[in-house]
Amino acid sequence: MEAELKRSAGVTAATIVRPIATSGEVFPDGSMIELIGRVHHGNLALMLWDGARETAGSRVEHSGRFYEPARFDGTVLRELTLPTHCCAHGTTRELLAETCSLLTTLAGLQEKSASLVGRIILCSALVDAVSVAPALMIVGPDTARGNRLVELLHCLCRHSLRLTGATPAGFCSLPSGVRFSYLISQLSISDKLRKLLDDASTCDRKIPSRGRLLDLFGVQVIQSDSVFVGDSWPPRSIQVSMIPKAQELPVFAPEEQLRITDEFQAKLLSFRRANLSVARKLQFDVSKFTPALRNLARSMAAATPDDTGLQTEVFELLRERDAEIRSEQWTAPNSVAIEAVLVTGQESPGGVIYVADLAAVAQEIMRRRGEEKAEINPAVFGKTLKVLGFTTEPRDAKGKKLILTDAVVSRARQLARAFDGPEVEDDGPWKH
């Protein structure tokens, strides 16, 4: 009898399925599970929404499976912004206007900057629908205004988490798959952390760490005195410069922060419910943007997926950034190499040119573009040609050479369009 009872107990224990720990789920039927905070107890709960009604508690059930909140260290939980309930958000246009009003009033942003930052905030709620998460770079001498913007973003962004002193190891110690909005404020960003942030900005790319794979995908906000100094801004980013103003910012007391957080997070949850599926299906034509900017343009459009008028505004909002990137590409190694092939192909169709001579043409192009100190190493230049798909002939006494066939010149023209580089005119060797 005792043996039978033990066997029976073992069978019963084996059939008990532990709840699945989660920080949020989106199911094929459109149902969602969201992390929520509890007002009085401070611990986590889950809210299940099936499209018609919501159920909240420390455990929820969907399709026969039970779910419970993922566990967070208490220090992370205290900094994590979560909704406590859900309430109607109005239209997308109304929610964006409300967001922009808070940004201009409380952080002193100009209208255009507020419109861009407002879209990043809405995108944080729909980040599951984009392939590359946008980033916001906060720079400039007015650190007080920069700090205020970070404080406000902590109230407004979904799953926002303030960090400082971040290192690659520290970043990788954060919980996986939460879709944080990372608010990083620190004096400097190391090259290793920068590369890690770039990797984490792409959806479905897992980062190996101590025998496990991490999903650290999420919107990034970086406030630093030396963010990417000497380099181009990442194409996925928006830059906001904090320049001192004579007008003082209004007081942003803790009670006001709590009020805004409670009200806005509830609306943002409603916005996410209504628009995540729409954002995932959105088709937005980005062909007018330079290729490097297209992911950011898609993200900005996905932030307002049910309003084509707001999507159209993205073209004007990103026009200046688009022009900057196009200008930078005039001296980018790939663009200059392609243009050098086009130049020589036009001057000597069907001819032969040695890689060293082609590198000299590329260097002259750089000089005419104002890069007086630029030096192009022929060996490195040859590798660039190879990466671009140009096949050189075997080396002879003068080195490697490229035959300027019609196919080679045609490929160079295709690459010029793909890289959105300068075009070679028919009546001249190159643009000045």
Image: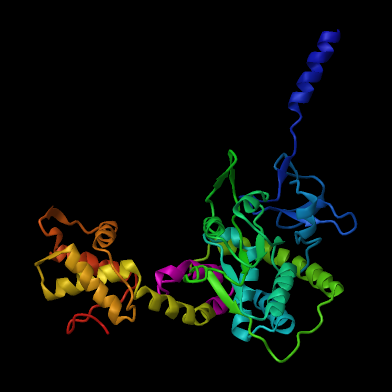
Residue 96 placement, left or right of 40: left
Please say if 421 is above or below 208: below
Residue 153 placement, left or right of 386: right
Picture coordinates of residue 296, whole percent (x, y):
51, 69
Picture coordinates of residue 414, whole percent (x, y):
26, 67
Quarter of the rendering containing residue 37: bottom right
Picture coordinates of residue 152, whole percent (x, y):
73, 73
Please say if 249 is above or below 120: below
Residue 220 on the magenta segment:
no
Residue 321 placement, left or right of 20: left
Residue 291 on the magenta segment:
yes
Quarter of the rendering containing residue 425: bottom left
Please say if 48 is above or below 97: above
Picture coordinates of residue 324, whole percent (x, y):
44, 79
**Relative depth, front residue between 336 and 136:** 336
Q: Which residues are magenta?
A: 284-311
